[in-house]
Image (spheres, grey):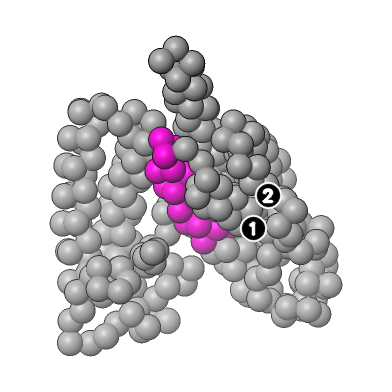
Amino acid sequence: MWFYEKKLQYPVRVSTCNPKLAKYLIEQYGGADGELAAALRYLNQRYTIPDKVVGLLTDIGTEEFAHLEMIATMVYKLTKDATPEQLKEAGLGEHYVNHDSALFYNNAAGTPWTATYIQAKGDPIADLYEDIAAEEKARATYQWIIDMSDDPDLNDGLRFLRQREIVHSQRFREAVEILKEERDRKKFF
Amino acid sequence: MKELPQEYYQLLEEIQAADFVLVELSLYLDTHPNDIEAIQQFNQYAQYSKQLKQMFESKFGALQQFGNSFSDANWSWGTMPWPWQV
């Protein structure tokens, strides 16, 4: 089972109300390479992956939910004081008529999250290569959002998240090597 | 939401720092399970994190759900602020 802990993984601060930045950031909430997709992808793959890497998928999948909460906190703080007029100016008028200022799992263009963003092939190498690619795509997305942002407080949190993608990618690459080693060993004995 | 003392943020950040070490060591140990030194450091920080949380919780209420934290006479789970509110 899972336990909630009443703290963020890393402090989230924002300088000012900025719904435009929130609109970009929602890409990492409900987008193809976002944190929801990551958490659901890894925690679903782990049932059929070799035992040697189940621990890693469980731990990284769980950490992704902590990142999802950080993104939600950023979006919430960037939009909580915005008027409907400000949301409209930021391109969030369509969001407002459907959700008020509630969060929703969609990407920056407003397309709702879909399970077609993720895969589980049952082939451990195929699954892990997808996971490595997902981390690299998420890392790139964080960089593009940082490039669009002029909020130094927000960028501090975004840089933390960008670096986590690098660590996850490295650990998944090590998992691939562990499985290859195991496979080659079986060939000889 | 009433103003929180500076101490809330300081203690919370110490916990976040200690728990970050634990997350990093967990992922590392998942792919390097035979590194005894890393395991020792993991146990040392697990102990340290528990101490920090006990101190935080005696002042600001439970951090963890479903009995992983003790409660005082006031059930503070719903009244103390949520992470996105601080």
Residue shown at 72% from the left, 80% from the top: A100
Q: Quadrant of residue B60?
A: bottom left
Q: Secondary structure at mark 1?
A: helix
> How many numbered discs sit on the rendered protein?
2
- A10 or B10: nearer the viewer: A10
In 3D space, how far apart are the residues under numbered discs 2 and 1 (Cα atoms)? 14 Å
Residue A58 in magenta stretch: yes
Callout 2 amino acid: Ile
Which residue is at 74% across, 59% downward?
A114
Q: Are marks 2 and 1 on the same chain?
A: yes
> Residue at position x 37%, y 36% from top?
B30
Residue A111 drawn at (x, y percent): 80, 61
Indicate whether A56 appears above or below A115: above
Is residue A111 visible in the rendered structure shown here? yes
Q: Secondary structure at mark 2?
A: loop
Q: Which residue occupies 59% across, 68% down? A: A76
Is A80 left or right of B85, judged from the image as shown? right
The N terminus of chain A appears in which quarter of the rendering? bottom left
Q: Disc 1 residue type?
A: Tyr
What is the x, y in percent for residue B24? 37, 39
The chief SS type of the magenta part is helix
Classed neighbour count for the residue bearing mark 2: other residues with Cα under 10 Å, few (<14), some (14–19), many (≥20) = some
Earlier along the polypeptide chain: callout 2 or callout 1? 1
Q: Is residue B36 left or right of residue A5?
A: left
- The segment highlighted magenta reads A51-71
Residue pointed to by mark 2: A118
Q: Report the disc number at residue A29.
A: 1
Whether A65 is among the magenta residues is yes
Q: Nearer the viewer, mark 2 or mark 1?
A: 2
Residue A158, image x, y percentages: 56, 47
